[in-house]
Amino acid sequence: MPLIACRIIEVCVFRFVHDHPEYLLLQRSADEPIHPSLWQFISGSINDGEKATDAALREMSEETALTPHLFWVVPHVNTFYDHAYDAVNLSPFFAAQVHVGDEPTLSAEHQRYEWLRYPEARRRLVWPGQRQGLEIVKDYIIGGEAAADRTMVRL
């Protein structure tokens, strides 16, 4: 029977340029053993004993050197099956807003980044769960749903 694991987080970073949201996507390095050259959000492992929110903020700092201006727990959990570990992974999803002038400094895990508007960001993401997370951020967080205030994490 497969395990159920929660050991990975994802963070959708966005900013506003002239009142239009742009989403940060990172391209994995070509020499990465898992999914080389794939476009993705910030993602990373949750350390033993670490809260998912803390892991998300740590991974954001490690992979981009960015600090969020605002930060949310998104009402979405990405799920995927990892056949190598025979595990169904549950990946908590977060959103982080940065200031318009903020630019990432990439770690060795990534070779490029781009700030993209929603249609292009959606096209670049290959996994359905990431596309769903992006849509929820667009509609729920950026769209100003009333409940979004309740999922904001005070930094």
Image: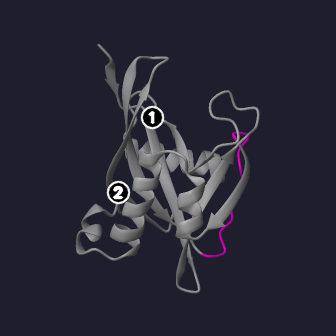
N-terminal of the pair, mark 1 or mark 2, is 1
Tag 2's secondary structure? strand
Residue named by callout 1: 46
Q: Amino acid at mark 1?
A: Ile
Residue named by callout 2: 74
Seen in the picture, residue 60 relative to 151 is either above or below; the reply is above
Q: Is residue 23 left or right of residue 27?
A: left
Seen in the picture, residue 21 relative to 54 is either above or below; the reply is below
Q: Position of residue 13 (x, y in %)?
A: 53, 61
Q: Are marks 1 and 2 in contact (CB under 8 Å)?
A: no
Q: Position of residue 37 (x, y in %)?
A: 70, 42
Is there any visible trace of residue 105 in the rendered image?
A: no
Residue at 46 percent of width and 31 percent of height: 47
* Magenta segment, prevailing SS (helix, strand or loop): loop
Q: Amino acid at mark 2?
A: Val
Residue 128 is a magenta residue: no
Q: Position of residue 60 (x, y in %)?
A: 56, 51
